[in-house]
Image: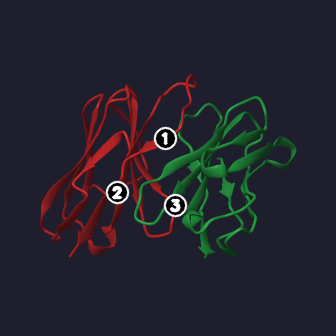
Amino acid sequence: AQSVSQHNHHVILSEAASLELGCNYSYGGTVNLFWYVQYPGQHLQLLLKYFSGDPLVKGIKGFEAEFIKSKFSFNLRKPSVQWSDTAEYFCAVRSGGSYIPTFGRGTSLIVHP
Amino acid sequence: DTEVTQTPKHLVMGMTNKKSLKCEQHMGHRAMYWYKQKAKKPPELMFVYSYEKLSINESVPSRFSPECPNSSLLNLHLHALQPEDSALYLCASSQVSGSGTGELFFGEGSRLTVL
């Protein structure tokens, strides 16, 4: 079964700092990769996704992620965070022909103004 | 705003009550999901309907009973819940096959409190 690891459980940054959140998965075949964000009191929404093609994908609000197949990774990055980026971030992976994604445990990001 | 609509947004119920959560989507998605989410935790899959048929039940207690009346609607019937069932219940939808984008679209959730 697929497993998804998010090693950074809690991240605290100051505004303008750079961000990188790790995501690793276990399945070695074809995968679809997602990052979801959940702002305080709001629903889960898609930040970005990778299906095929360019392994560097750009999402909303200045986020990007890079798929590195050899490392089974899909890390999320943002060069300069803002206070409004404070949220929970979830990596999800869909694999093995299933349409149902597996979620990582999430990373709680707090950005201090 | 999300294209998946859930009602009610908040629900408080006693352990002997019967209530229902409702979810609606009009994106033509043929897979619909119920998730349970505790604070600062990932969503836990409960049920999946594919083409209006229950395809996955993640060993959910029988006090939760899903129903998919048609391709746009998904209900979760609640009966004799326990306080530990208090959580945010999320509905989601997606396309079923590998064609298309395949991501989940989530509703805003129904926050359930069991007294």
- Mark 1 is on which residue type? Leu
Q: Residue at x 67, y 51 (%)?
A: A63
- Circle 2 residue: B89
Q: Measuring 73% from the left and 48% from the top, which residue is drawn there?
A: A65
Residue A14 picture location, percent across and down: 68, 75
Which secondary structure, mark 2?
Answer: strand
Q: Colour of chain B?
A: red
A12 relative to B68, above or below: below
Horizontal and vertical percent position of residue B115: 20, 76
Chain drawn in green: A
Label 1 neighbour load within 10 Å: few <14, some 14-19, many 20+? many
CA neighbours of label 3 inside 10 A, class few (<14), some (14 to 19), many (20+): many
**Contact between labelled residues 1 and 2, with CB atoms less than 8 Å apart:** no
Quarter of the image where the C terminus of chain A is located:
bottom right
Work out whether residue B99 or residue B65 is closer to the camera in this orientation and state it. B99
The answer to whether A11 appears left or right of B66 in the picture is right
Q: Is residue B24 left or right of residue B106?
A: left
Marked residue chain, label 3: B
Q: Which residue is mark 3?
A: B42
Residue bearing mark 1? B104
Colour scheme of the picture: by chain
